[in-house]
Amino acid sequence: MRKMTWAVLLGAAILVNGCGTSYPLDLTEEEWEAMSPEERAEARKKQAALDKAEEERRAAEAKAREAEARERAEELAKARREADYGQRVQCVLRDAEAHFAGRWRAIEPITLDLATGMELAVDLAEPAEGGLRYSDEGYASFDGQTVQICDRPADERRDTDRCARLLGTFKDYRRGLRETVKGRDFLRGQLRCDLVPQTQLGPNVIINQNR
């Protein structure tokens, strides 16, 4: 999902939210003023219970997200560790631009470490130099010959022209392959990819130089 951060707008939103007086259980001021002290105490008690339940729910969700992130990180590490020579590349996208708000905007360099069968979410973001900063997310993969960064994950992708692709043979990637890549109205830049050396792969890797 495309995002835009703006410190000034955020500060204004905080000020607006802090101006009004809120009452327990979303009661109106008229309803609150009409209540007895005992009723107000009971309303505060119920609101405190609701707040505690909401806090516990958010904590449980955060814990589940952290567990999911750890599991995903372990899966990626395993895929990289078990990749054969020729099935894992490391890449850098430089001098890159992403298409934000109707025009091309420079973004920070991107590094990738991809094994075949892996789809990796990558952040596309303008340099953090001002209050207004656009960002987006891409999805990178490698199938042994093609490195691509697309605007949608594979199961949601409709338009493959919006993928920035680098195509090469085993020997191309072994020597190091660099080309200008472009996905229509999405991403463009200089992409350089190399095969990961044998010393960074698993202990049982067998290299076939004739592939």
Image (cartoon, grey):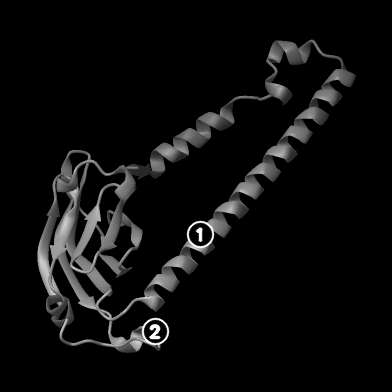
Which residue is depicted at the point 31% across and 68% down? 114
Classify mark 1: residues with Cα within 10 Å, few (<14), some (14-19) or many (20+): few
The residue closer to the viewer here, 126 or 191, is 191
Which quadrant: the N terminus? top left
Name the one closer to the observer, 158 or 97: 158
Which residue: 18% across, 47% down? 160
> Could you say where residue 50 lies in the image, as x and y percent from the top left?
74, 33
Q: Is residue 118 left or right of residue 192?
A: right
Q: Kindly indicate whether the residue at mark 2 contacts the one at mark 1 (C-beta within 8 angstroms).
A: no
Q: Is residue 133 left or right of residue 183?
A: right
Q: Amino acid at mark 1?
A: Ala
Residue at the disc numbered 1: 69
- Circle 2 crowding by C-alpha within 10 Å: few under 14, some 14–19, many from 20: some
From the viewer's perspective, is residue 175 above or below residue 76?
A: below
Mark count:
2
Q: Which badge, 1 or 2, is on the more N-terminal residue?
A: 1
Determine the residue positioned at 47% across, 34% down: 13
From the top left corner, tell me how far across and down residue 41 is, in percent: 85, 25
Location of the C terminus by quadrant is: bottom left
Amino acid under disc 2: Gly
Decide which of 17, 55 is in the foreground and name it.
55
Say which element carries label 2.
Answer: loop
Question: Which residue ends up furthest to the right in the rendered image?
Answer: 38
Q: Which numbered disc covers residue 202? A: 2
As measured in the structure, the alpha-carbon distance from the residue carrying label 1 to the one carrying label 2 is: 23 Å
Quick check: 196 above or below 1? below
Q: Position of residue 96 (x, y in %)?
A: 18, 59
Would residue 208 be seen by someone viewing this image from the given angle?
Answer: yes
